[in-house]
Image: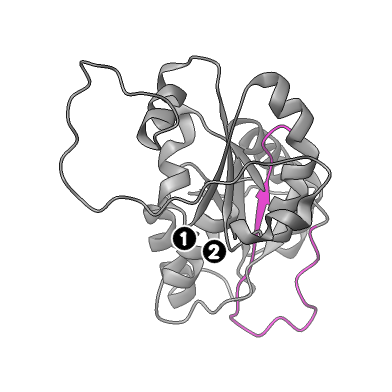
Amino acid sequence: MTGLGAGPDAAAQVTAALAGSPAIVLAFFPGGIEASAPFDLFTEAARQVDGVEWMHTSDPKDFAAAAAAAGGGIAAPPAAAAAAAPFIVLVRGGGGSPQSVTFTGALDDDTKPLVDFVKAERLPTVVDFTDDNIEMIFESSVKHQVLLFATPEQHTEMAGFFAAVAQEYRGQYMFVTVGMDGGESTSGVAEYFGLVAAAPDAEEEEEGDDPMVGRCTFTPGCPRVHRACF
């Protein structure tokens, strides 16, 4: 967790953070952070979520500089921001145009609302399955995943349609693309869901609850047909 510097320093910190992290959390504490219960909860929430840069300030000018550097159309904190109520926004980078989402929950006596918010919003609308984000996918507060298994050619054909459906159901389902390119991690996922035969020498999994899986063949151009998938 990082305290923002003054003006240009705050902007530089945010730019660097977005370059190295899929998302950042920016917080403005109008009442300061000394002996602040909300700030203590913010600090504790930051310890519970990896893979995200958490940044804070109590200076409105520094927050404005950071927000401008982050992009994503961050709104200014309410002019009459309640005395000690923090203003918290998450900004997704991920190499595309930054997108921001404002935390509207309460930070009163529990970190769960903020932790759940960050885990749900830190990933883009459509997530590419990689070794680096496996934990973030399955640690998300969104517990239902829609996985698109596709070759690079199929992905190109379906990308727009899949993204449109993902946007419509954001927050209810996590939409994940799994490239069928022969990679070890993606092949393992395909085996797990029974889309390809498991290797003969594969070790047996421990017994446990099987995931509930629904299968649907996507056909570009007829999105309404596939509402039954959800």
Disc 2 marks which residue?
Answer: 117
Work out how far the residue at label 1 is from the one at label 2, CA to CA, in angstroms.
8 Å
Residue 139, given in percent of the width and then of the height, sits at: 41, 51
- Asked if the residue under mark 2 is in contact with the one under mark 1, i.e. CB atoms within 8 Å, the reply is yes
Residue 33, given in percent of the width and then of the height, sits at: 51, 68
Q: Is residue 198 above or below residue 216?
A: above
| Residue 123: numbered disc | none
Q: Is residue 39 above or below residue 149?
A: below
Disc 1 marks which residue?
Answer: 141
Q: Residues within 10 Å of mark 2 (few under 14, many from 20)?
A: many
- Pick whichever of labels 1 and 2 is earlier in the sequence: 2
Front position in the image: 51 or 210? 210
Residue 91, given in percent of the width and then of the height, sits at: 68, 51
In the displayed structure image, the side of residue 30 where residue 39 appears, left or right: left
Front position in the image: 70 or 187? 187
> How does the figure colour the protein chain or chains?
one colour
Q: Is residue 170 shown to the viewer in this render?
A: yes
- Residue extent of the magenta highlight: 74-98
